[in-house]
Image: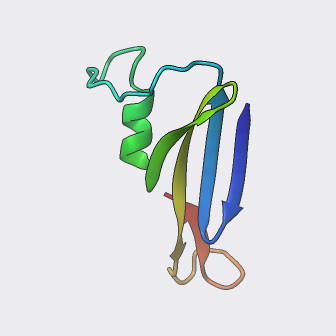
Amino acid sequence: MLVITCAYGQLRIDVHDTSWSEPVPVDAPADAETGRGLMLVASLSTDWGFYRTPAGKAVYFTLAFQADLDEGDGSPQGHRSRVR
């Protein structure tokens, strides 16, 4: 199950699964086809972690919004928000 919420300037994604295994980032080579998911999440997110659920666990991460105050970018007020 995937749960996406947005509040207080942050996007939060929770991914639920039925595995009881603790998620561990793997130091996989850049060209590896598997095992890089948590490494990517850790490098791109503001925060990440996991918690136990009755059916297994959920891994979550947050992305903070940052206002881009560039003038003349085509948006109505001269600014836009980006997820980082």
Seen from the viewer's position, the closer of residues 53 and 48 is: 53
The quarter of the image holding the N terminus is top right
For image coordinates 61% across by 52% down, the residue present is: 12
Taking 58 as reference, is 35 left or right?
A: left
For image coordinates 69% across by 60% down, the residue present is: 6
Task: Give residue 46's quadrant in the image.
Answer: bottom left
Task: Give residue 59's quadrant in the image.
Answer: top right
Q: How many marks?
A: 0
Task: Give residue 34's quadrant in the image.
Answer: top left
Seen from the viewer's position, the closer of residues 39 and 51 is: 51
Seen from the viewer's position, the closer of residues 63 and 15 is: 15
Seen from the viewer's position, the closer of residues 18 and 2 is: 18
Taking 10 as reference, is 29 left or right?
A: left
| Image vertical order of residue 79 relative to residue 22, above or below | below
Taking the view exactly as shown, the residue that stands out farthest to the front is: 54
For image coordinates 37% across by 27% down, the residue present is: 24
Query: In the rendering, at what x and y percent does residue 31 appear?
Result: 32, 18
Question: Which of the colour schemes (rainbow, by chain, secondary structure, one colour) is used?
Answer: rainbow
Query: In the rendering, at what x and y percent does residue 83 appear?
Result: 55, 59
Query: In the rendering, at what x and y percent does residue 50 appear?
Result: 51, 39
| Image vertical order of residue 48 relative to residue 25, above or below | below
For image coordinates 42% across by 32% down, the residue present is: 38
Query: In the rendering, at what x and y percent does residue 20 appear?
Result: 54, 20
